């Protein structure tokens, strides 16, 4: 990255202050001179054209008076503007007229025919410019007819193919129908402007060189003490305070800055010396404090260990008593639950005895009912078998009806055929035969439905026969099970009477055990309270010891930091060269 020093900044600033105003003033002057020159050129061309028109008017008056013929007057006008006609058809440029080195007059009519011209007199200029991108001849004609005016166009320089900018003034004369134009090349009049531009650039270069020399000397005069001060500051930053003080003889702001810098240097030397002394004293004090803190910390640690042992023993005793108390409470609760459960068991056994007696009665009734159910099932089995036999008979009858319906349908069909053979006489019989056939078909359909229904009934009866057989077996099995259940209920009844007596005795013993366990639990709770109080006191003493130990550790850490700070101060102060 480019480093911009004060000297470079001053030089760049001076260059800008010199060049910018000169360039601005030069450009403004150049533009002003150019504009004024353009105005002078336009006014000169306009004046020359007006003088030519006045000359033409004067010659026309001579024609009107008969002094000159029109042709002689026109030729006289051409000679006055340009010169006499040469052998090659050209005319010279009249240098007596101030139109510049290469400026000249020419005249043409509205059709573009050149009536007076140094080179192309008698030719049609519009035809010569056919296909050109800039038909300036037509613009000259239009401008002259419109009352006159200035116009610019490019044309070849005399005796050269190089194109240059031309300025022309054209105006139509009030007589003869001629359009008079005076034209000149802009380069013939702008040479003064180019000299102004060259002088401006030369002046700019001289001012810049003179300014650079002046600024260089001035910036050197300012930057030299600043550079010396910067180098001295770098030495001070590296810890070197042993050098000589800066020269402070100047009477300007840099002299004030140098005196302040020297004062700062003296203060830094005093500060570094005092820091060395303070660091040594602080280091000795911190070491002495660290020794005292170590002894105090050892004493507090011994006290804390003793208290911790007492607290641990008290906590162990309290924990043991607490566990015993909880165990006793749990045992008392268990005994109480046993007593309660025994009482409930006695009541339950009494209820069970009553329920067992009722169950025995119900079993006896169930045996009687099962005998009645067995008889009923036997009767239903016989009825179901009879239904099966009757359904078979009904099936045979339905088959017979179906056969009769088929024969009837066949006979009705034959009768219909015979009736159709009889013609009109058999039509009534045919209707009757048709109705009989329909009835036969309906009978066949109904017989089919009855057969399907009988088949379904037969299947249900068969399943009922099977179910009745199974029911008989289940009833027989149930009767045997109920008989066995009755015998079991008899045994349960005897066992329940024995259990009820034993539960009554266990309930009385459990109540006595519950009263004894409550007395033991109360004694253990009192012992636990005393042990907890002892443990709490020991913990308070231990906590105080720990707090004192933490404070002493903080003080020891602070003393260590002081020692480190003293060492750092000595190291920092040692970096300075006095």
Image (spheres, rainbow, N blue to C red):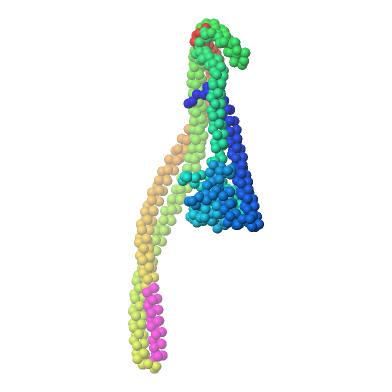
Residue nearer the viewer, 35 or 149:
149
Q: Position of residue 260 (x, y in %)?
A: 60, 13
Q: Residue at x 54, y 36 (%)?
A: 194
Taking the spot 49% from the left edge, 45% from the top edge, the residue there is 158
> Can you tell which quarter of the image residue 536 is in?
top right
Residue 287 picture location, percent across and down: 51, 7
Q: Residue furthest front?
A: 67
Q: Position of residue 425 (x, y in %)?
A: 39, 94
Q: Which residues are magenta?
A: 426-449
Can you see residue 46?
no
In the image, is 508 to the left or to the right of 150? left
Residue 139, position as x, y percentages in the image: 56, 53
**Residue most extreme to the bottom:** 425
* Of the pair 509 and 90, the residue shown nearer to us: 90
Q: Magenta stretch: residue 446 in it?
A: yes
Q: Main secondary structure of the magenta part?
A: helix
């Amino acid at each position: 990255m480019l480093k911009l020093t004060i000297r470079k900044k001053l030089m760049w600033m001076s260059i800008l202050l010199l060049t910018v105003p000169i360039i601005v003033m030069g450009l403004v002057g150049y533009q002003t001179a150019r504009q004024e020159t353009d105005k002078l050129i336009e006014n000169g061309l306009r004046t020359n054209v007006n003088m030519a028109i006045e000359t033409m008017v004067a010659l026309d008056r001579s024609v009107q008076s008969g002094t000159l013929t029109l042709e002689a007057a026109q030729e006289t006008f051409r000679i006055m503007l340009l010169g006499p006609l040469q052998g090659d058809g050209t005319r010279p440029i009249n240098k007596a007229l101030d139109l510049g080195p290469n400026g000249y007059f020419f005249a043409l009519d509205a059709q573009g025919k050149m009536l007076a011209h140094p080179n192309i007199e008698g030719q049609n200029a519009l035809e010569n410019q056919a296909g050109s991108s800039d038909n300036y001849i037509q613009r000259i004609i239009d401008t002259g007819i419109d009352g006159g005016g200035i116009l610019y166009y490019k044309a070849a320089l005399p005796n050269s193919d190089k194109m240059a900018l031309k300025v022309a003034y054209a105006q139509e004369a009030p007589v003869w129908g001629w359009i008079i134009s005076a034209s000149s090349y802009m380069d013939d009049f702008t040479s003064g402007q180019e000299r102004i531009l060259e002088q401006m650039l030369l002046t700019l270069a001289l001012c810049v060189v003179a300014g650079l020399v002046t600024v260089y000397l001035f910036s050197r005069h300012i930057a030299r003490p600043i550079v010396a001060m910067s180098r001295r500051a770098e030495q001070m930053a590296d810890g070197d305070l042993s050098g000589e003080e800066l020269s402070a003889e100047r009477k300007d702001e840099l002299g004030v800055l140098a005196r302040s810098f020297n004062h700062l240097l003296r203060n830094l030397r005093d500060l570094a010396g005092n820091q060395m002394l303070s660091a040594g004293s602080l280091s000795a004090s911190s070491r002495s404090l660290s020794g005292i803190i170590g002894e105090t910390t050892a004493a507090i640690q011994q006290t804390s260990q003793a208290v911790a042992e007492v607290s641990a023993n008290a906590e162990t005793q309290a924990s043991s008593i607490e566990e015993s108390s909880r165990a006793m409470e749990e045992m008392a609760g268990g005994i109480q639950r046993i007593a309660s459960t025994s009482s409930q068991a006695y009541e339950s056994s009494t209820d069970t005895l009553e329920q067992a007696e009722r169950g025995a009665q119900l079993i006896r009734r169930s045996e009687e009912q099962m005998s009645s159910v067995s008889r009923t099932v036997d009767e239903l089995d016989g009825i179901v078998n009879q239904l099966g036999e009757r359904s078979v008979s009904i099936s045979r009858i339905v088959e017979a009806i179906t056969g009769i319906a088929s024969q009837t349908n066949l006979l009705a069909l034959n009768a219909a055929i015979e009736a159709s053979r009889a013609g009109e006489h058999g039509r009534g019989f045919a209707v009757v035969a048709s109705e009989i056939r329909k009835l036969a078909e309906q009978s066949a359909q109904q017989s089919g439905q009855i057969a399907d229904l009988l088949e379904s009934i037969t299947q249900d009866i068969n399943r009922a026969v099977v179910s009745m057989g199974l029911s008989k077996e289940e009833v027989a099995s149930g009767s045997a099970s109920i008989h066995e259940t009755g015998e079991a209920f008899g045994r349960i009844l005897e066992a329940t009477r024995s259990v009820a007596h034993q539960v009554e005795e266990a309930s009385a013993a459990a109540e006595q055990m519950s009263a004894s366990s409550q007395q033991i639990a109360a004694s253990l709770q009192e012992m636990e309270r005393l042990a907890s109080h002892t443990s709490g006191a020991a913990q308070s003493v231990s906590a105080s010891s720990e707090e004192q130990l933490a404070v002493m550790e903080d003080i020891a850490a602070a003393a260590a930091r002081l020692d480190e700070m003293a060492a750092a101060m000595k190291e920092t102060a040692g970096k300075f060269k006095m």
